[in-house]
Amino acid sequence: MELDVRTLMVAFSVNLFAGAIALPTIMGWRRIGVAARHAVLASGLQALGWFCLVMSTLARNEWPDRLLSTLAMGAMSASLVMLWRAIRLWTGHDQPGGRSLGLIVLWMLTGLMTLGYGLGFSDYAWWVGLANGVLGLQMLMVVGAALSPSPGTHRGWRAVIAASMLLMATLTFWRGLLGAFFTESYPFLTAPHPINQLSALASSVVLLLNSMALLMAYREEAERQLREQAITDGLTGLLNRRAWTERAEALLADARRYQQPLGLMMIDIDHFKRVNDDHGHARGDQALQLVARMLREQLRSGDLAGRYGGEEFCVLLTHTREGPALSLDQRLRQCLRLESEQALGFVLEYSAGLAALGENDRTLDDLLRRADDALYEAKRAGRAQVVLAAR
């Protein structure tokens, strides 16, 4: 059975546009994260690239053909950059707003290939070899991104993308070699060569597999966000009371088992009601967020901070005795005073109760009760200070 390459290209382009419309419709553009948006952009750019490529085969003059073909290659290459970026964001290897060496290399390849393709369009062997070589290399980089170890993501969708893109990279390199070095067997883009027919058929299969894989990745991201929302305080970004308590109990059990020092500090922003009354609730929210940011900046990676309720925060200090805990309190106060005056327009203070783990502290509630009593004493003594709980 003879397959018409141009017909296969048109059918594939239609499927691409359908997928490019369906993905953002299913995901919801406003609700999706940065990674999913990159995936949607990858789908849209790929559809645009294939549309330009199909239209270029209908052009009767060189310049429309050159323009459409160059746009097609640029869009296809950019779509691979977007797909690579989406995978890196989903797997946690890149952060939103960050720039990695791989991303810079990919964009450089896109720019140089598009420029070289347009300028060297009159040399068929040159642009076929250049375009397919660069696209194949970018596909291999996508394969590498999908196969990079990522304990927090499911292997299934990454394996699907890696396998499908490896297949397309192989076919793309093959087509580039034929066009560059065996031009007589591959004289034009829509030539009825087995590699063209195989590539067109494989592209449709890869489109289906990648679409399913991207939806799986999006679902995984959405589930992860729901889990984070369930344990995170929406205003401050710290752990909420339930999540903090669960993790603190586990850390306390470890400290007791291995006889390690541990401290618990309860923090209460001084005169917080006055902040809301005098400066408004929006400024009060900013004050809470500022305290949370200061805690994140001053605490070590093994420490645990959470919003316990209202203007109260709880901090569990692992492997920490009373002296270092008091030093932390001093640093935190100093930073908060400086930052609050600049960010809020007034100095923000807090009272704190500090309890070091003792022999009689059998449960987290015992430790919390002692820290809370010390916090109460700090308020009675005039606020803006820390009181060490009696053992």
Image (cartoon, rainbow, N blue to C red):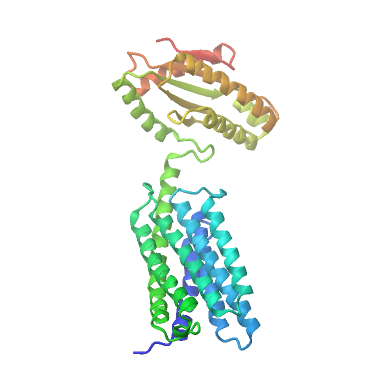
The answer to whether 208 appears left or right of 6 in the picture is left
The answer to whether 97 appears left or right of 389 in the picture is right
The answer to whether 51 appears left or right of 15 in the picture is right
Screen quadrant of the C terminus: top left
> Considering only vertical position in the picture, is 51 above or below 257?
below
Give residue 118's position: percent from left, percent from top: 62, 74
Residue at image coords 63%, 77%? 67
> Considering only vertical position in the picture, is 371 above or below 186?
above
Residue at image coords 63%, 31%? 276
Which one is in front, 107 or 373? 107
> Considering only vertical position in the picture, is 347 above or below 72?
above
Screen quadrant of the N terminus: bottom left
Which one is in front, 368 or 38? 38
Which one is in front, 13 or 126? 126
Residue at image coords 38%, 74%? 202
Quadrant of the rendered structure where residue 294 is?
top right
Residue that protrudes farthest toward the left in the picture: 257
Residue that protrudes farthest toward the front in the picture: 181
The answer to whether 256 appears left or right of 7 in the picture is left
Q: Is residue 344 visible?
A: no
Number of marks: 0
Give residue 168's position: percent from left, percent from top: 41, 69
Q: Is residue 62 visible?
A: yes
Give residue 60's position: percent from left, percent from top: 61, 89
Give residue 154's position: percent from left, percent from top: 35, 53
